[in-house]
Image (cartoon, rainbow, N blue to C red):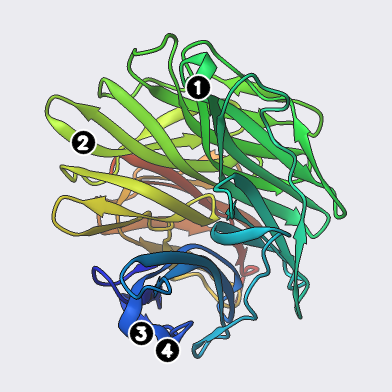
């Protein structure tokens, strides 16, 4: 997790070691300008292993005009790398020709050490543009990004919110744009990187406004983008999700959150059929985290711990049952985790067994267990609910398949696990 530390100076990162979050020190991009520092911030991070992460953002320095009175704020892109032991500065990403400043908002890396990062830049005449750069393991290169607005009749504003790469030759970046002559109603856009250039894709639009804030691509033919939409200008926002099937984008039906306003900020897909999206739901009673899960067919609302006046801003999933989400609350940073469903089966004979066998299943948050031997459900076994489950049965000679179906429930989220050990009964006389 990355961000800014303090109100004016510092770049911050915290690492999860499987048990707790711990602060990590990151290098200062410009120590000589420390007295004039406005801020340092890391906005995006991508990790391909425990020892390989790249984080991007920007830093700003106050410089003075020749009269020594007026200050000029200069924003520059920032990139840093984690090697498992510490953070170090990467060469500074270059800016497009004519750009005076720029920042980076999101980054996505692939196992071959290639990374793509996106953000924005500004020119001397204060014209804004979309910024995309590629890291090949040694240097950064700038790639031209087409404007999502095209020819327009008035000023437009476009923002890239997120990028996801499933291969070094396939990335999708998403965001939103608006035009003053269209009452400033936001519309979605998506751009595809094919390894050599960016191209615009046709995305869902709506009269009330559509906006993408996050995207996750587990494969080049499967991407999920999330954000918000409104059926008419001025009406409450609702959670938006859309799917890329390798050819086109289509809107997915999402359940309505409990609040009047609902939006999704980030999504992470462990596979095309396992995605988790996070955001916020807001009503007269305040703002609360919103979590939705995609199973490849439909979206459903999950129930994270009930934290008031808080929202979730980013999520990362390493499997269909293990995700970490981060965000902000009224009083502190919010970190929430789903715990993988796990159970331990003990008492399985190493060699053949004769007579009666007793097995024990233990694990946290177990809600039910069904035992079956060779396809037949075992009856009459004793069960100690919640902590320890026990099955006792007679084992006859030969090989037998035991099936243990376990259901878990954590934070109102249901998970399933099936264990299938082979048991061998001893021949008669042994």
* Picture residue at 38% right of the left edge, 58% below the top: 339
Does the CB distance between marks 4 and 1 fall below 8 Å? no
Q: Earlier in the sequence, mark 2 or mark 3?
A: 3
Compute the Cα span from label 2 to label 4.
39 Å
The image quarter in which residue 411 lies: top left
Q: What element carries label 1?
A: helix
Image quarter of the N terminus: bottom left
Q: Is residue 135 visible?
A: yes
Foreground residue among 398 and 417: 417
Percent of width and height locating residue 244: 71, 32
Q: Position of residue 191 (x, y in %)?
A: 72, 39
- Picture quarter containing residue 242? top right
- Picture layout, residue 106 above or below residue 153: below
Label number found at residue 31: 4
Q: Camera-side residue: 120 or 110?
A: 120
User: Residue 38 in the image: x percent, y percent?
Assistant: 34, 70
Q: Which residue position holds label 2?
A: 287
CA distance for labels 2 and 3: 37 Å
Pointer 2: residues within 10 angstroms few (<14), some, or many (20+)? many
Residue under pointer 1: 180
Q: Are marks 4 and 3 in contact (CB under 8 Å)?
A: yes
Question: Which of the two discs, 1 and 2, labels the residue nearer the N terminus?
Answer: 1
- CA separation, marks 4 and 3? 5 Å
Whether residue 122 sits left or right of residue 7 in the image: it is right
- The reply, left or right, for residue 316 in relation to residue 171 is left
Residue at mark 4 to residue at mark 1: CA–CA distance: 41 Å
* SS of the residue under disc 2: strand
Where the C terminus falls, by quadrant?
bottom right
Residue located beneath label 3 in the image: 34
Q: Say which element carries label 4.
A: helix
């Amino acid at each position: 997790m990355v961000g800014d530390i303090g109100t004016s100076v510092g770049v911050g990162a915290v690492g999860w070691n499987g048990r707790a979050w711990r602060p990590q020190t990151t290098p200062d991009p410009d120590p000589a300008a420390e007295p004039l520092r406005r801020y340092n911030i890391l906005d995006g991070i991508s990790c391909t292993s425990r020892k390989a992460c790249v984080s991007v953002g920007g830093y700003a320095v106050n410089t003075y005009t020749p009269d020594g009175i007026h200050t000029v704020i200069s924003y520059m892109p920032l990139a840093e790398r984690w090697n498992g032991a510490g953070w170090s500065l990467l060469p500074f990403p270059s800016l497009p020709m004519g750009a005076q400043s720029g920042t980076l908002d999101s980054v996505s890396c692939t196992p071959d050490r290639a990374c793509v990062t996106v953000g924005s830049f500004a020119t001397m005449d204060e014209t804004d543009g979309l910024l995309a750069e590629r890291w090949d393991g040694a240097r950064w290169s700038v790639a031209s990004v087409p404007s999502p607005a095209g020819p327009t009749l008035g000023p437009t504003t476009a923002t890239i919110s997120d990028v996801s790469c499933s291969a070094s030759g396939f990335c999708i970046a998403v965001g939103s744009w608006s035009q003053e002559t269209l009452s400033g109603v936001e519309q979605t856009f998506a751009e595809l990187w094919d390894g050599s250039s960016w191209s615009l894709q046709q995305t869902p639009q709506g009269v009330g406004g559509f906006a993408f804030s996050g995207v996750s691509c587990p494969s080049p033919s499967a991407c999920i983008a999330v954000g918000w939409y409104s059926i008419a200008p001025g009406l409450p926002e609702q959670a938006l999700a859309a799917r890329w099937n390798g050819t086109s984008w289509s809107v997915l039906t999402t359940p309505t959150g409990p609040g009047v306003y609902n939006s999704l900020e980030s999504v992470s897909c462990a596979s095309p059929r396992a995605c988790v999206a996070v955001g916020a739901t807001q009503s007269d009673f305040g703002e609360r985290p919103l979590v939705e899960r995609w199973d490849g067919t439909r979206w459903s609302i999950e129930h994270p711990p009930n934290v008031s006046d808080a929202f979730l801003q980013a999520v990362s999933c390493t499997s269909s049952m293990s995700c970490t989400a981060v965000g902000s609350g009224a009083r502190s940073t919010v970190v929430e985790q789903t715990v993988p469903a796990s159970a331990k089966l003990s008492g399985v004979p190493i060699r053949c067994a004769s007579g009666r066998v007793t097995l024990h299943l233990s694990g946290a948050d177990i809600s039910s267990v069904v035992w079956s031997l060779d396809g037949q459900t075992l009856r009459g076994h004793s069960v100690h609910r919640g902590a320890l489950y026990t099955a006792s049965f007679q084992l006859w000679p030969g090989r037998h398949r035991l099936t243990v179906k376990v259901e878990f429930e954590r934070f109102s989220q249901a998970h399933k696990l099936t264990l299938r050990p082979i048991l061998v009964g001893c021949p008669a006389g042994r």
